[in-house]
Amino acid sequence: MTAPVAPTAHPPGLAVEGVVVRYGDETVLDVEHLELRRGEVTVVVGPNGCGKSTLLRVLGRLVTPDAGCALLDGTPVARMPARDVARALAILPQGPTAPDGMSVAELVSRGRDPHRRWYDQWSRDDERVVLDCLEVTGMSAFGNRGLDELSGGQRQRAWIAMALAQDTRMLLLDEPTTYLDVVHQLDVLGLVRRLNEERGLTVVMVLHDLTMAARYADRIVAMRAGRVVADGPPDEVVTTQVLREVFDLESEVVRDSVTGRLAVVPLGRAAPEGEPAVGGAHGRLAR
Amino acid sequence: MTPSVKHPGASSGRAPSVGPTVVLPPAVRVGPLSAVWRPRQVAVLLATTLAALVVATVAVGTGEFFLGPGRVLEVLGGAGTRREDVVVWQVRLPRVLLGLVAGVALGLSGAVVQTVARNPLASPDLLGVTAGASVGAVAVITLGGDDPVGGVLRGLGVPLASCVGGLLASLLVFWIARRAGAASGLGPVLVGIGVSALLGSLVSWLMISASIDTAVRANVWLTGTLNGRSWHELWVVVAVVSVCLPVLAVAQARLAPLALGVDVARGLGVRVSAAVGVLLVVAVALASVTTAMLGPIAFVALVCPHLARLACGGSRAPLAVSGILGALLLTASDLAARVLVPTVQVPVGAVTALVGAPFLLWLLVRTRKEPSR
């Protein structure tokens, strides 16, 4: 570790230092040092069970690590009051569920909970922010609909609107596109990108689709077996060698002429033994 | 940092501003104070409170010695004859008031448990509270002995033991559900049914090993009734309720985020373990003290939150409405039992079960649809 752990040494944003998470005897997350800089869209990728969700949950204070800590602008989140964390950072866990009969507006209003006081339950600010979040997510027309009447993509946008209503600088999303068809995936990721560009929102999200990751990320963090394997801009991380190392995937990485971004053509499972060493030219390898 | 290539989705996705505009709840705002104004909830609350008071007044007047509601109010105002005073003040009023307060306790407890467990079928009955309280109470009745000292112990011990029993049983249910990775959804209910069956057999065993006299006394307790209840029982329930109410008034703000699940609630800044702990302890205390004083009263805690939600709309039962509905339901059931079968003392628990069981079945059929995400 090169950076000292003193609070002032950290640039604004999120970081983890020496984080270890164990479930029983199994170590599911072991990250020495990772910084997520402000203003970027970072996408975390990796095979099932690689600890990417756990990493996000540590950052969002849903999981307390067995060792180390997550830092928010240099302060350990575990030492911050829960409410202060919720005003600085919104996290949307994977597959959230709402009670039957809840309307979109009711759900989005919950995002104001960290700002409420017992004597100040529904201020003008609350109202303004909720309307704005419905507007920006394109959900204004659905505000009074029940969540159970919506399509998967609309529902996901409603949940994102709730997280936005927390009015935070950072947004953590755990697999926001799971179960969505391709158009709805584009909707949701386009929305996230736009929020980043227009509002300077720092975004960290877990995605499964590598082509989508390459397309929407400023930076990709690739994980395997609880460790960060590669960390850098898409052009450095989305390479045949890194994908083989991370996923055991044989693939061809091509530049898509329409988007100008990288696209992954998966070919098959790589032979587990005797794989070639990954060269330094392909991404900053943290291993 | 921003890539040179424009992200294709970045500019699309904003829906055109057509269609109906959102109607957000109206607000009451005075200076720095603000609250959501829910006229329907207030109307339902007033109507149910009024109904509960009317039923209670009628109930005080109803019996072998009949008094009209107007006369009841006069007697309460101090204008009664000696006989009227005895009937109203010593016999019927404590019983009716106990019905009201116990109903409030059950209604509140049910609403809290249902929201925290995120399960429309959860209630203290189904989470083992009632079975645990039964074991506690029956154990003290049957093992407490018949001598005068044992009798005193019994008087103090039954409520205490059933409270502790209810708390332990519900802790056991949640602990097992958590170990089994089924802490939400139907998990706790299924575990609760299992634990309740186990505790039920324990009650049977205690009853069989007891002498006939004590077994009969235990059985009377197990029927769940307001018969013969007096000021003593009322004050115990009032004491517990008045301790629980302020705690609930503070903790209830956590119910709305908790209804979205543990992770989302934590993300919204709720200290989940503390909040859930406080809320469940209060819910279990309310249900246990009621069970201790009246015996098991089936279904009131299960039904009231649903009725409250149906009456007020929205996705969550308002606590106050659920509580008042509990009072109304319990008082009305007791009155119905006395009016419909005047010759026998029908326990109120039998009436609530008669109403509640079909409701539970209807609920099971109704909730067997895909849960919303």
Image (cartoon, grey):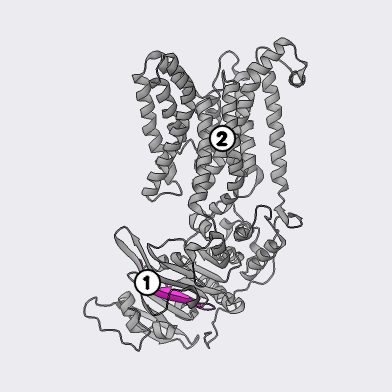
Bounds of the magenta span? A33-49
- Residue found 32% across the figure and 70% down from its top: A225
Dot 1 corresponds to which residue?
Answer: A31
* Residue B341 x %, y %: 59, 17
Front-most of B309 and B273? B273
Q: Does the CB distance between marks 2 and 1 fall below 8 Å?
A: no
Left or right: where A277 falls relative to B352: left
Give the residue drawn at x 57%, y 18%. B228
Going by the picture, which residue comes out furthest to the left? A274
Q: Which mark is residue B106?
A: 2
Q: Residue at x 54, y 82 (%)?
A: B7
Quarter assignment of residue A237: bottom left
- Dot 2 alpha-carbon crowd within 10 angstroms: few under 14, some 14 to 19, many 20 or more: many
**Side (left or right) of B280 relative to B66:** left
Task: State the residue in front, A186 or A200.
Answer: A200
> How far apart are labels 2 and 1 at the CA level?
49 Å
In magenta segment, residue B90: no
Identify the residue at image location x=56%, y=28%.
Answer: B236
On the image, the x and y values in percent for residue A184 come to: 53, 70
The location of residue B306, given as percent across then percent down, is 58, 41
Q: Amino acid at mark 2?
A: Leu
